Amino acid sequence: MVPFTVIGAIAGTLATLLFVGSALPMLVRAGRTRDLSSYSPANLIIANLGNLAQTIYVITIPPGPLWLMHGFNVVVSALMLLWWLRHHWLPNRRGSLPRPHVEEPEHDHSDHRSDRNRGPLARC
């Protein structure tokens, strides 16, 4: 019979790998596009405050998978907050606020005068 602590360590390692795997695409996309307009600044601040409080708990337990997951979470949350501040709140070098990244729509050669060719379902 496998000890419960071994099962817990395996589950914790799997959870850490799944969490990291789920968060990396979001982080890569945010870093590449610099489009963080869908992220709430309040959520980013609260997540970082929560991580700070959670750190007090994590350092009281023996090192293990939770330390890795929490460390990754701290880094991701802090990066997202810093990137949000940098691209949406702090003025750029010219003294104006940076413009959010907006993707240009692709133009096809269909009838652009018709409303039925516009909107999210136009290409369906």
Image: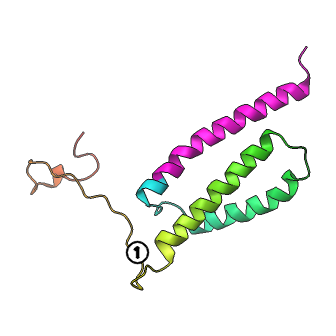
x 68%, y 65%: residue: 46
Decide which of 52, 120 is in the foreground and name it: 52
The magenta stretch spans residue 104: no
State the count of labels: 1
Residue 20 placement (x, y as % from top left): 63, 42
x 90%, y 47%: residue: 61
Left or right: residue 77 versus residue 63 is: left
Extent of the magenta region: 1-29
Residue 30 placement (x, y as % from top left): 48, 55
Secondary structure type for disc 1: loop
Residue 6 placement (x, y as % from top left): 86, 26
Left or right: residue 79 versus residue 25 is: right
Residue 77 placement (x, y as % from top left): 64, 58
Amino acid at pointer 1 = Pro
Q: In this view, does 53 lie above or below 9?
A: below
| Residue annotated with mark 1 | 98
